Image (spheres, grey):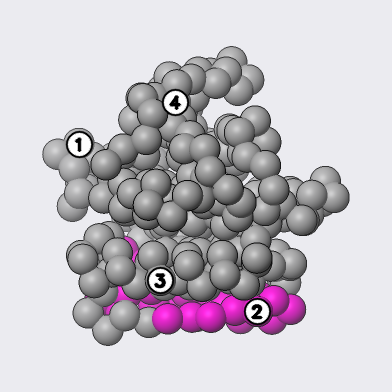
Amino acid sequence: MTDATTSFLKVGNTEIAYRHRKGRAPGAVWLGGYKSDMLGTKAEALDAWASENGHAFLRHDYSGHGESAGAFRDGTISLWLEQSLGVFRAFTQGPQVLVGSSMGAWIALRMAQELNKAGERDRLAGLLLLAPAPDFTSDLVEPKLSDAHRRELEERGYMEEPSEYSDEPYVYTRALFEDGVRNRVLDGIIDTHCPVHILQGKADPDVPFAHAMRLAEHLPADDVTLSLIGDGDHRLSRPQDIALILRSLEGLIDRAV
């Protein structure tokens, strides 16, 4: 089940693809992972849930992802954050639950910071973070770089690495690493001013569950729930994972109404 066909919003100089299901608040806003798109299993399940329950649901593709314009190699956390805030402000009304997967959880945390800074903290009903990867460039990728990778970044401005999830390799640019430092969130207290529920698989090969536990330690001022899934992987897309995601979303929405 899908919502309306894809539409486009110009954010900056880029046409950003989005899908918006109208409904009541609190709504849910999907923020996908690095090199993923808005038509994945989890996003489709959230849309079906929103349709069945009458809640609003918004999702989009970052530039260089899915149906959006722009080159993937030109993307940075700051750019994708700007686009996410642009779509959020254009199409949502009332409190929303940000559902961020992997890198999308980093974007969600930065959105919370920026909304709070702008006096819009009432727009957040909660954060649902799935296999969260905040600061992944500096904390998860960079420490594992080989000397050859570092030379590629210095000489070519980018490096490539095989992906377990696609035939095309992951591309990491020097600009992405440098911008990631400017968007770090794990260097102090993160005040989201809303409930946060983290779902993390203990069998995740990409984001160690210790990373999710570390994130929870940076959220001491907020109401935080950390659920560890013993056999959960990074995708968290099995039927039982989807069911847990939907229950968690319902819990955050119930608390906001």
Q: Amino acid at mark 3?
A: Arg
Return the residue at label 4: 17
Looking at the image, can residue 170 be seen?
no
Choose the circle earlier in sequence order: 1 or 3.
Answer: 1
Choose the circle earlier in sequence order: 3 or 4.
Answer: 4
Which residue is at the front of the view, 80 or 195? 195
Residue 223 numbered mark, or none: 2
Return the residue at label 1: 168
Q: Nearer the viewer, mark 2 or mark 3?
A: 3
Left/right placement of residue 97 relative to residue 17 reads right
Measured in 3D between alpha carbons, the distance from the residue under mark 1 to the one under mark 3, in whole angstroms, is 34 Å
Q: Residues within 10 Å of mark 2 (few under 14, many from 20)?
A: some
Q: Picture coordinates of residue 76 (x, y %)?
A: 53, 37
Q: Residues within 10 Å of mark 4 (few under 14, many from 20)?
A: many
Looking at the image, can residue 252 be seen?
yes
Q: Residue at x 65, y 49 (%)?
A: 111
- Residue 139 part of the magenta segment: no
